[in-house]
Amino acid sequence: MNRALHSFLALSFSLLATLGWSQTAKYSNEFLNIGVGARALAMSRAQVATVNDVTSAYWNPAGLAAIESNLQVSAQHAEYFAGIANYDYVGVGARVNDESALGFSFIRFGVDDIPNTTDLIDQNGIVNYDRITSFSTADYAFLTSYSKSFKDNRLRIGGNAKVIYRSVGDMAQAWGFGLDLGAQYNVGKWRFGAVGRDITSTYNSWSFSLDERTIEVFEATDNEIPENGLEITLPRLVVGVGRQFSIKDKVFILTELNADITTDGRRNVLISGEPFSVDPNLGLEISYLNIFHVRGGLGNFQRIKAEIGDYFEYTFQPNVGVGVTIKDVLSIDYALTDIGDQSVALYSNVFSLRVAINKQKK
């Protein structure tokens, strides 16, 4: 019977989470804030000013115009929460001409094989484990990106049009549409960037299809029955500055500082306010001959009340990673990221692959 209770709780919590998200704008579409690419995650997501590869479509679409190859393809797979959730990303970026580029990205974050125990007990009160089915709850995003450069590639401007689909088995689905707009500007070795995400707000339209048995379970457990509605993702602004240093043209050091400014009210971040909160991120990359890379970063600064005493403590999330680039064609990156409380040490291993394809010269 413990198995039945565990399965029922898994189903209940997933539906309740969906209901909660449909009623508030805070943390809406949060799966789109996880990040893509092991390089970026190792640098604690500090990318908006210096990103210049296919992952620009996610971090700052303006950077797509800076890709040097005719075509780039990137892929990533990661498992979170001890393998319970799977996070996958595939991106394609291609140059249109010397000044512009296009990008297409796919992101999925999901929990699969969740037991559905609503029919575990039949009308006669008999428990039958053969009546247990399973379902998935997943979030999908499809991004189409365009970028164009100006003033000898010193200024780049880009944008995203994104379609979002979210589902909880056959019980709940949502469709949404949003826009992002970004810019990058180079001054010598300094790099400046900004991106406005969900600049017009993103509206997810939720619809629920609950059968009579599921409704009975909600009523029996005193849970509110979810209704169709809108989930609104409010705009956020990410600004950043970065600089590259070189030592004898062999060792290159890249550092970047970002500030993630949200508009959905007070959050538990370093600078918390109403309605704006600011979450800083700092990243560092050291490269040797542009082949071997070591990376690190600090982010997720939080102010937490101490367990004993009337004062607050500050915590942060460290990230590290390494990478190798082979003949400017193949890049393999790895990141070790702490996604939980430091005392729990929930670390995730993230791997990503990037391939650059150049058109053969005749």
Image: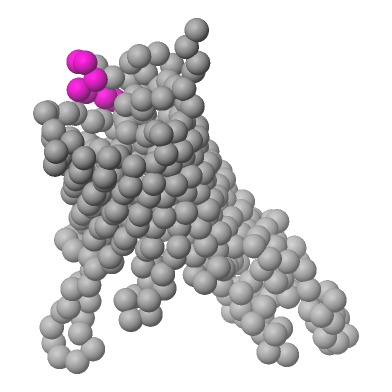
Q: Residue furthest right?
A: 124
Q: Residue 281, located in which quarter of the rendered image?
A: bottom left
Magenta residues, start to end: 151-158
Q: Residue at x 23, y 31 (%)?
A: 184
Q: Residue 180, located in which quarter of the rendered image?
A: top left
Q: Would residue 333 appear left or right of 66 to someone viewing this image?
A: right
Q: Residue 348, located in which quarter of the rendered image?
A: bottom left
Does 155 lie within the magenta span?
A: yes
Image x and y of residue 170, in percent: 70, 56
Image x and y of residue 308, in percent: 19, 92
Q: Would residue 277 appear left or right of 56 to someone viewing this image?
A: left
* 65 or 244: nearer the viewer: 244
Q: Residue at x 61, y 74 (%)?
A: 10
Quadrant of the image for the N terminus?
Answer: bottom right
Q: Residue furthest top?
A: 362
Image x and y of residue 136, in percent: 65, 60
* 42 or 5: nearer the viewer: 42
Q: Would residue 350 appear left or right of 83 to someone viewing this image?
A: left
Q: Residue at x 48, y 44 (%)?
A: 353
**Is residue 275 shown to the viewer in this render?**
no
Image x and y of residue 13, in percent: 56, 72
* 132 or 321: nearer the viewer: 321
Does 328 lie within the magenta span?
A: no
